[in-house]
Image (tube, grey):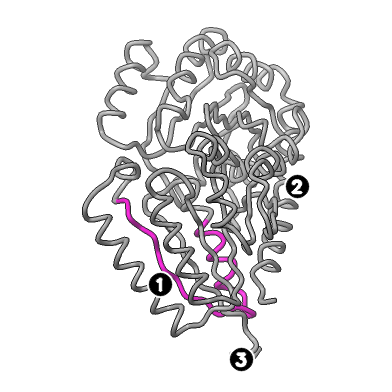
Amino acid sequence: MSEQTKTRVLFLVQLPPPLHGASTMNQSVFNAISTDNQFKIRLINLNFARDLADLQKVRFGKVVKAFAIFLRLIWQLLTFRPHTVYFSIVPLNFVLIRDALYLLIIKLLLPKGKYVLHFHRSGLIEYAIKWRLKWFYRLLFRRCDIIHLSESLVEKEIEPLRLVNVRIHAIPNFIDDIEPVPEKTISAGHDNILFLSNLLPQKGYNTLVDAFALLEKEYPNLTLTIAGPAPSQNVFIKLKNKITALGLDEKVLVTGKVDGAEKRKLFANASIFILPSEREYFPLVVLEAMAYGVAVISSARDNLDCYFQDERDILYIDKIEVSSIVKCIKKLIDEPDLRISIASNATFKSKEIQRESSNRLKKLLKAI
């Protein structure tokens, strides 16, 4: 394909680090488009945060960087002249001011372009109602293509805004192609539960440890691995102190951040993956566990249920309580055929959904 016929796409996104759901998804989209010969791309990385603890902080350095990126955005719009701008926008809180200015200058300097806005979280409608901003969103999003993670989020978050001249798309998350997982190393009669996520309070790892303390009395060969980075070292200290106080030092392993071969090994050793989070939208780690052939227990039924059926592709936790977590884990331990069936179905289903999501996104980013 000649350079003249390629679709020019400008990415305005945050890529890792720090590593979290939105930045990981942005990386997957960027990788999918940058390796496709029908696109020519440029990247402006919105990497304002130093680490997880810095994500919600307001610093003078961030303000300076926001202005520098504003100037760089103008330069790219004038020199690269993209057909499409893919913008991982955060339309909430103080970040709304920054991102609204970015979007307005994009529209001003690229009046005939395509503007694709990708939302990675919920809370938009609540924020709009609280601050009476529906009118502002109608103006801001005019002539944009908006991507949200599921039909349920579109119904709850976008449709009540009554946007005008906007195209709305429900496209599930997808991940990069993963390397084959090493051969399963789980021994007979032994089940290892894996938790892999950022160690933030709302992720539910503390409740999981409390549930495991009850389960290990009934299943003496049961073990738990908690993996993922934390905002501070103090989080690890408190978690390990809790594990010690419950007498679980020999049964619970806390690894910290893992990636590459080390992460693949954790999935190879896991018979159950669990994410009992209080607030999830479309967790990429669930897709990753499914791709690795591990049975998944997860919250986020509202957003995942239209893609993954309970007790066929996944097991949902409806209440983030010790008793609910215990019940779900016991079910998969006591019914190994169900666990194997869920893992097998989910592997096929997740690959199908991800392939469709990638193709739909590429089609959307193509020039009109």
Q: Seen in the image, is 309 located left or right of residue 331? A: right
x, y percent for residue 258? 41, 44
On whether residue 32 falls in the magenta region, the answer is yes
> How many numbered discs?
3
Q: Residue at x 54, y 43 (%)?
A: 121
Q: For mark 3, what is the residue? A: 4
Density class for disc 3 (Cα within 10 Å; few <14, some 14-19, many ≥20) is few
Q: Seen in the image, is 71 located left or right of residue 41? A: left
Q: Residue at x 59, y 75 (%)?
A: 113
Q: Seen in the image, is 296 located left or right of residue 193? A: right
x, y percent for residue 107? 52, 70
At label 1, which amino acid type do we have?
A: Leu
Q: For mark 1, what is the residue? A: 73
Residue sitting nearer the eye, 174 or 58: 58
Q: Nearer the viewer, mark 1 or mark 3?
A: 1
Q: Quadrant of the N terminus?
A: bottom right
Quadrant hosting residue 363: bottom right
Point out which mark residue 348 bears. Answer: 2
Q: On screen, 285 above or below 210?
A: below
At label 2, which amino acid type do we have?
A: Phe
Q: Nearer the viewer, mark 2 or mark 1?
A: 1
Q: Residue at x 57, y 59 (%)?
A: 117
Q: On screen, 345 above or below 4?
A: above
Q: What residue range appears in magenta?
A: 26-49
Point out which mark residue 235 bears. Answer: none
